[in-house]
Amino acid sequence: MPLHTKEPRSPTSVSPGGSPGAILLGQTCLHQGPGQKMSLSVLEGMGFRVGQALGERLPQETLAFREELDVLKFLCKDLWVAVFQKQMDSLRTNHQGTYVLQDNSFPLLIRMASGPQYLEEAPKFLAFTCGLLRGTLSTLGIKSLVTASVASLPTCKFQVVIQKT
């Protein structure tokens, strides 16, 4: 799937060629042909860049976290409120670099919760958020692997595994 940088006319406009399968996201235009699915790695990459940008705008005292757990608490409370207007519902850890963040009513999945047939569409909405978390952690100096899982809509879990260097 080609990835083009275009100047959007408005936030809801289609690409300059008028292609009805194109979706404009800021400066990025993703073309979807019939039967093509939007690349999850592209969405994750976009989320990563947004997460980095958010991390760069954090107050200096935020950047002075001493413990990984403090950073993850910050993500669950402050970052989640800034992005989704709610806190994450739970944070669990095995104290060995693996954290599970759970949101019982993830805002991007709430409208899809009306039926189990939408469960297969959930990864599209989670890829960006995984990148967002990974990008913010990266800006805070933590290299990580972030994955998401959905057992029932709109609940989702994000697993963050800290990469030790």
Image: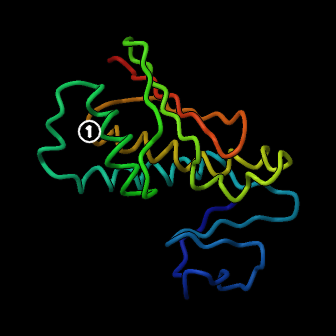
Residue holding disc 1: 140
**For the point 55% across and 86% down, which residue is it?**
10
**For the point 55% across and 68% down, which residue is it?**
28
Give the percent coordinates (x, y) of residue 162.
Answer: 39, 23
Nearer-the-camera pick, 131 or 8: 131
Which corner quadrant of the image does residue 151 belong to? top right
Give the percent coordinates (x, y) of residue 30.
Answer: 65, 65
Would you say 88 lies left or right of 39 here? left
Which corner quadrant of the image does residue 18 belong to? bottom right
Label 1 crowd (10 A; few <14 / some 14-19 / many >=20): some
Q: Callout 1, which amino acid?
A: Leu
**For the point 86% across and 48% down, which residue is it?**
117
Say if 8 sits above or below 61 in the image: below
Considering the numbered disc 1 on the image, is that residue within a helix, a strand or a loop?
A: loop
Say if 8 sits above or below 161 in the image: below
Would you say 137 lies left or right of 107 here? left
Nearer-the-camera pick, 104 or 42: 104
Would you say 118 lies left or right of 163 here? right
